[in-house]
Image (spheres, helix red, strand yellow):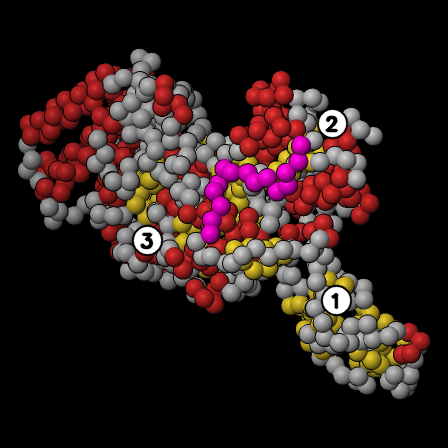
Amino acid sequence: MNKNMAKKISTEPKMNYDLNLLQDMYKKMLLIRRFEEKAGQLYGMGQIGGFCHLYIGQEAVVVGIQSAQIDGDSIVTSYRDHGHMLACDMDPKGVMAELTGRKDGYSKGKGGSMHMFSREKGFFGGHGIVAAQVPIGAGLAFSHKYNGNKNVSITYFGDGAANQGQVYESYNIASLWKLPVVFVIENNKYGMGTSVNRSSAGENLSDRGKPYGIMSEIVDGMDILAVREAAIRAIDYCRSGKGPYILEMKTYRYRGHSMSDPAKYRTRDEVDKIRKTSDPIENIKSLLNKMGVEDKTLKDIDTNIKSVIAEAAKFAQDSPEPSDDELFTDITIN
Amino acid sequence: MTIEILMPALSPTMEEGTLSKWLVNEGDSISSGDLIAEIETDKATMEVEAVDDGKIGQLLVAEGTEGVKVNTPIALLVDTNESPHATIKNIADKPYLEKEKIPSKPINDKPISIEVNSSLITVREALRNAMAEEMRADKSVFVMGEEVAEYQGAYKVTQGLLNEFGGKRVYDTPITEHGFAGIGIGAAFGNLKPIVEFMTFNFAMQAMDQIINSAAKTLYMSGGQMGCPIVFRGPNGAASRVAAQHSQCYASWYAHCPGLKVVSPWSSKDAKGLLKSAIRDPDPVIFLENEVMYGQSFSCPDDDNFTLPIGKANIEKEGNDVTIIAFSIMVGKSLDAAEILKDKNINAEVINLRTLRPLDVDTIIESVKKTNRVVTCEEGFPFSGIGAEISALITEKAFDWLDAPVVRVTGKDVPMPYAANLENLALPQVDDIVIACAQVCYED
């Protein structure tokens, strides 16, 4: 078993993919990117307050994993959550209106960027405390197992969260109780301003599942096909009742930790180099080109998405603020 | 030479136990370290080892005897060359040789009256019955915590649940409060109804972030989508001689936070009725029990559907002269104080809060309007405590009805000391309540 742990997966794209699937994945990734660009713009205009953590650069991770899920699976993540919500097919209007703190936002304007949920779409947040979503994700997996359904919990966290004690408390229990949870470490190389080398002992974060007997893989998180294939393996493993699985996604965020982060801890060259050589959207775009999809088709997709986002932004600015009465609702159910 | 073997204290709060089995007979030679008896305490059945070498001269307490006080001689050890019974007459009559049940001290030294359709049961049994009944009624209810399953509960509150419901409903967790509290919360988000036992609330400090940030706040942050029907329960407050890190009342900590309900029962009836309501409640409930109360017996309704409403206080004793407001173990002390106050011609009203959040403000204010004087009682620290909150509320809502400033009886503003005398000083006692009541009544 140890042999298989943390194996490096080949990232050679396979050409036998269904074209529709690839196009759908491309659309979703682009939707996330355009959404985040708009969110950054609205933040600059003062329309979005507080913390706002953008997902630009990491799109392949959530879209690739989502492509391997089935209805009823649950998803939970940290505060860098806009991409996950869009990948779950939550309405960009509702997400954007939450960012602007309006009544039509997913949390009626009471949660903001970091705290949004949709039971209907299986999205359980959106959690603001680093790593708090990890035991919660294991608990969602517990509920699937308890109810005897075949669903799994996809629990995302970052390289920064990977040093929190509660992650290992969750690994231990998830492995002991064989909970159907895929732990997805989105290793974007920086926990806020501290590089993973300066914060995390040992070679790979995925190795940390070994002492708990948890299978793990390191995946090129900039390559959506590699992500999807790894996700299929991991989810199949969990769904078949064998217990948890760790996927360490090597990815990269182009923007600062949050909008207020000047990102002085890395050079502009570092960011530019990754953008030029391994951008996940450019990767799938060139694959689509190779498969015969014309530039015009791709440009039309982009134009459509831009109009969806523009509409969402308008909606989010036109939606009224929550009424004053909302201050005292939703504190308890009864 | 004859040595008395004494009933040992096997836990911090143990005052008496059951001598369930002798593992030696009179006349047996034993060496230090040999097992001589099994003793059942509130918490567990334990084996007792001989400390000295010798021969069992006489067994003074019969097998099966309940209520044997700590430090009572239970057997005599004689030199190996002496014959059994040689020196007995001078040392002890056989005080407990006949099997008998020694009743524990009733509250106020009055016999406990058993109400209609009720039984005399301990708080521990009431809590267990509440869980078992709710687990029978609702398959989404399950129990998790340290030692709740195979060990039968560190304080035996979950005794028998594993046997009845099996390992898919009762889970032993590792000693990782932060992690398993979060897993419970995730399970509640997944529409299950977890009962999470903390061995004591002192250890729930490790889980505080999950309780406050995840359980209490998510409903609000989700605009009402993400209910969290979970119960966190376990002993709270001082136990006995376990010092600062294991003796603290957390009532005001949890009651401070919107999104939580905070319940703290006193009697068996409270324990059953409130725990059942807590399990059925769609919101996260902090259920603060008290270790010292677990073994106390009260009349408790037998009905499987008996519940008590969360958010409603109970007037345990009516009176006109002063209102004593208490919860948990302090209710019993307040009733004892009320008895003593009768001799001073002070007729005290005793309110058992039962719930700390939402607080039953109406019952408090109505009582203030009647008595015009208030003493609050809690084990917790005074600063920003429950008493401070009640005092502020009364100032805001019934200031003109007061004939004296509200007085708080609380634990002292110090970490709990270990030494018996200091611990006694640190905890609020019946006398403190009596003095406070006399003070607000301007009596000596």
3D distance between C-alphas at marks 3 and 2: 57 Å
Q: Give the left or right position of residue B210, taking residue A68 as reference.
A: right
**Label 2 CA crowd tier, 10 Å (few <14, some 14–19, many 20+):** many
The residue pinned by badge 1 equals B68
**Label 1 CA crowd tier, 10 Å (few <14, some 14–19, many 20+):** many
Nearer-N-terminus badge (2/1) = 1
Q: Secondary structure at mark 1?
A: strand
Q: Is residue A276 above or below residue A133?
A: above
Give how far across and how far down residue A121 sits, in percent: 25, 40
The residue pinned by badge 3 equals A144
Asked if the residue under mark 2 is in contact with the one under mark 3, i.e. CB atoms within 8 Å, the reply is: no
The quadrant holding residue B391 is top right
Give how far across and how far down residue A101 sits, in percent: 33, 21
The residue pinned by badge 2 equals B440
Q: Main secondary structure of the magenta part?
A: loop
Q: Chain of mark 3?
A: A
Residues in magenta? B306-320
Q: Give the left or right position of residue A188, taking residue B54 as reference.
A: left
Give the position of the N terminus of chain A as an image quadrant. Answer: bottom left
Q: Give the left or right position of residue B424, taking residue A41 as reference.
A: right
Q: Secondary structure at mark 2?
A: helix
3D distance between C-alphas at marks 2 and 1: 42 Å
The quadrant holding residue B325 is top right
- Identify the residue shown where x is 83% and y is 75%: B94
